[in-house]
Image (cartoon, rainbow, N blue to C red):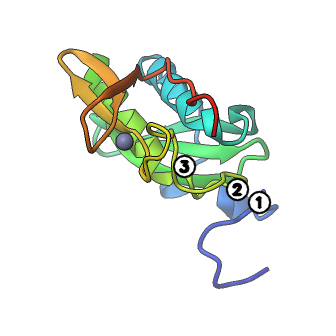
Amino acid sequence: MNPDRQRPLEEDPNPAYRLGEDGRVPTALPAALAGPAAAAFADLAESGPSPRRFELAFLPVLDDARYGVVYVRGSGGTLYFGFGIDLELRGAALTVELAWRLQEGYDELPGVPGPLHPMCSPGHGHPAEATLTGDEAWWVCPETGTPLARIGEYRAPAGD
Ligand SMILES: [Zn+2]
């Protein structure tokens, strides 16, 4: 094992990689987070590997009930990345927050090709951006502001 490695590139048998905050093993997402997180993660995976290779998990922050940590882990339990979430967020604001935080770490997951997830319009050299539009959560082009799809309804553009 390479001791300089910060993050395992594949499932790692070292049980330390399965532990989150305070050495606890993350459990299932709270119901309020599960739906929007799964929807956003599926959108990211439209041009990457199957989301079934990964699952989302959660730990509450022990000394502040308002916050939790969401993790993305492999089927063997290896945690690839995690981020804090404000548990008072609701609706589209929660969806946008989950989407951009999941997007931020997504291209570091094993097997994910390149950084453009979800892809913006063909020929654009950037990914779509999770944005609160009115009271809805959308993927939009960060250059033109063009709405591409509601978060959870994204489909990769046809062609190449
Ligand atoms: Zn664009």
Q: Observer-nearest residue: 76 or 92?
A: 92
Q: Mark 2 = which residue?
A: 110
Q: Earlier in the sequence, mark 1 or mark 3?
A: 1
Q: Is residue 131 left or right of residue 113?
A: left
Q: What residue type is labelled 2?
A: Pro
Residue 63 appears at what percent x and percent y? Answer: 31, 46
Where in the image, quadrant-wise, is ligand 1 located?
A: top left
Above or below for 52 versus 5: above
Residue 109: image tag:
none
Q: Mark 3 = which residue?
A: 106
Of the 4 image quadrants, the one containing the N terminus is bottom right
Q: Mark 1 = which residue?
A: 10
Q: Do the residues labelled 1 and 2 touch (CB within 8 Å)?
A: yes
The residue sitting at 66% across, 51% down in the picture is: 112
Q: Earlier in the sequence, mark 1 or mark 2?
A: 1
Residue 136 appears at what percent x and percent y? Answer: 27, 16
Which secondary structure, mark 1? loop
Above or below for 34 versus 6: above
Whether residue 139 is visible here, answered yes or no, is yes
The residue sitting at 65% across, 78% down in the picture is: 5
Q: What residue type is labelled 1?
A: Glu
Q: Which amino acid does label 3 sit on?
A: Tyr
Which secondary structure, mark 2? loop
Q: Is residue 88 left or right of residue 128?
A: left
The residue sitting at 29% across, 42% down in the picture is: 142
